Amino acid sequence: MNYIAVDWGTAHFRALSVRDGKVAASVEDHCGVGRCERAALPAILRQQLQRLEHGWDPQLPVMLCGMVGSNIGIADAGYLALPLDFSELLTRGQALPGILSNPLTLRPGICDRRVNEICRGEEMQLAGGLTLSDAQVFAVVGNHSKWMRVDRPRQRVASLTTLMTGELYQLALNHSVVGKGLPPQTASPAAFLAGVEVAQDVYRGSTTLISELFRCRGRYVLGVLDPASASSWLSGLLMGHEVLSGHPQTESVCFSGSATLLPLYRQVCEALDLPCTTLEAESALLAGLNAVFAEQV
Amino acid sequence: MNYIAVDWGTAHFRALSVRDGKVAASVEDHCGVGRCERAALPAILRQQLQRLEHGWDPQLPVMLCGMVGSNIGIADAGYLALPLDFSELLTRGQALPGILSNPLTLRPGICDRRVNEICRGEEMQLAGGLTLSDAQVFAVVGNHSKWMRVDRPRQRVASLTTLMTGELYQLALNHSVVGKGLPPQTASPAAFLAGVEVAQDVYRGSTTLISELFRCRGRYVLGVLDPASASSWLSGLLMGHEVLSGHPQTESVCFSGSATLLPLYRQVCEALDLPCTTLEAESALLAGLNAVFAEQV
């Protein structure tokens, strides 16, 4: 399996040159589609692929996934609706002529019209997770964590739920009164676990997430929380809330995400006594891409 | 009752010159304490009061309330802890010599150490509400809505809960992917009520606020919601969530807030069939200030 895959999100660009199913070269940049002129995207793609591999094989298939296929991307590739057969999850999407000499395709996102959910990019990690794990519930965690249930007997993606954990964390810390005037932050496992505990109070209904978000400030103003640990507490609260909202409890969840986030989600699950496994985003993505190209060679 | 009261928050400054319990003059400006150098605050105060009333009576008592009494203000006046006697709620706080020739005082905030809650400024509207309404639950709504229960027989403020409704609305709309790329917004009563309905689903536990916040985007991307109505939907969701979280259902709530917000909260309560009354923030504040100065002349 030889191909080039481009994971092009709102904030970041990443291209992988894959040979025999392994990453032979990769480039990344901050030229996310949300940061560039739409009209400039084809030229940016050509430049970046030049950096990836000078004078590449013009036969190599190239696939674009992520927000580049949205209404702010190179073209809108739409969404495949749930429930979705695994075979459809593994599509390369629509051909995009006139941009490269190589055969270029643009992957659609997935959506669940029953609950107004959309997802674009993370479904590739799910595609990989399906080959690397036997879980039935996957959580691709990060800025917008995507929780997805699959139905193995029917070979379908059954449901999709987004929890804006990462983005809410950044908003609270960098744009709201909660993070205002805080000193430089240091990671505190104790504050993190204290946040997870408060998430349990929210889950039990004795308080609300929106109140506790504000009380993060109350905590350090009143001297209950070290101001340098506010971000750890906040991350415990939000990740705890996410896991308690999404985890089915009765079965294990396979988490996929960055090497920084996975240990934190593991800690949350341990603290809550909930079963989980983890997969690095990179491995899950590559396995997903390989599955797509194995399917369609 | 003749006095000058200054309501000095993070973003705004407002000074009222009150004669015989009525506003004789007022000035406002954007020089909130969060926007100014701490060291410059005394000089800003003198300038603004000069604008309010040229050559004012040097006997007039001047009281500062709001964030100006916090750790980012002119001095930290601390917090009075709940449960709090009404008489304490009506204190002018600590004397602040050396800044004006007039007798100047700085009001503390209020807090509830049992649940890590803090409030600075809004308690003046509560003080006024107590004289204008016989409610036992007050909601001073806005950026950080403050829900407070009072115990009339014991003449005490019993509890305090903050819901970051206004700030979360601004964050979602202006700083997150939810509001990204939206066209100019127009108020839509139907979208507002649709948001309130989803808040009920959250209240019943069939979905979470954090997922529905993201699904606002899903709704307009998938064509279920007019993109120009996203802000109305979002405000219905967040205000609905606030009211459902705070309203005791069995008794009426007295809302205090701006003339723009009150009709919206009234609509939420009507849609949810919950009893309420409303008080304009301006009237509530003035009644609160009058109560403070009546108490201490």
Image (cartoon, coloured by chain):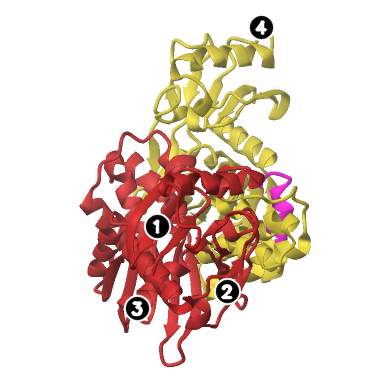
Chain colours: A yellow, B red
SS assignment at label 4: loop
Quadrant where the image shows the N terminus of chain A: top right
Q: Do marks 4 and 3 both belong to one polypeptide chain?
A: no
Instruction: Please determine whether, in this image, residue A128 is positioned above or below residue A99.
Output: below
Instruction: Please determine whether, in this image, residue A150 is positioned above or below residue A87.
Output: below
Q: Look at discs 4 and 3 and give the one toward the viewer.
A: 3
Residue tagged 3: B131
Would you say the magenta stretch is mainly helix, strand or loop?
helix
Residue tagged 2: A201
Residue B13 place in picture, x, y as percent: 47, 49
Label 1 chain ID: B
Q: Look at discs 1 and 3 and give the one toward the viewer.
A: 1
Q: Are marks 3 and 2 in contact (CB under 8 Å)?
A: no
Q: Amino acid at mark 1?
A: Ser
| Mark 1 residue crowding within 10 angstroms, few (<14) / some (14–19) / many (20+) | many
How far is disc 2 from disc 4 in space, using C-alphas? 58 Å
* Residue found 49% across the figure and 41% down from its top: B175
Residue A207 place in picture, x, y as percent: 52, 73
Residue tagged 1: B17
Q: Which residues are magenta?
A: A257-267
- Residue B244 falls in image quadrant: bottom left
| Mark 3 residue crowding within 10 angstroms, few (<14) / some (14–19) / many (20+) | few
Q: Is residue A258 magenta?
A: yes
How far is disc 1 from disc 4 in space, using C-alphas? 76 Å
How far is disc 4 from disc 3 in space, using C-alphas? 80 Å
Q: Amino acid at mark 4?
A: Gly
Q: Look at discs 1 and 4 and give the one toward the viewer.
A: 1
Q: Do marks 1 and 4 both belong to one polypeptide chain?
A: no
Q: Do marks 1 and 2 both belong to one polypeptide chain?
A: no
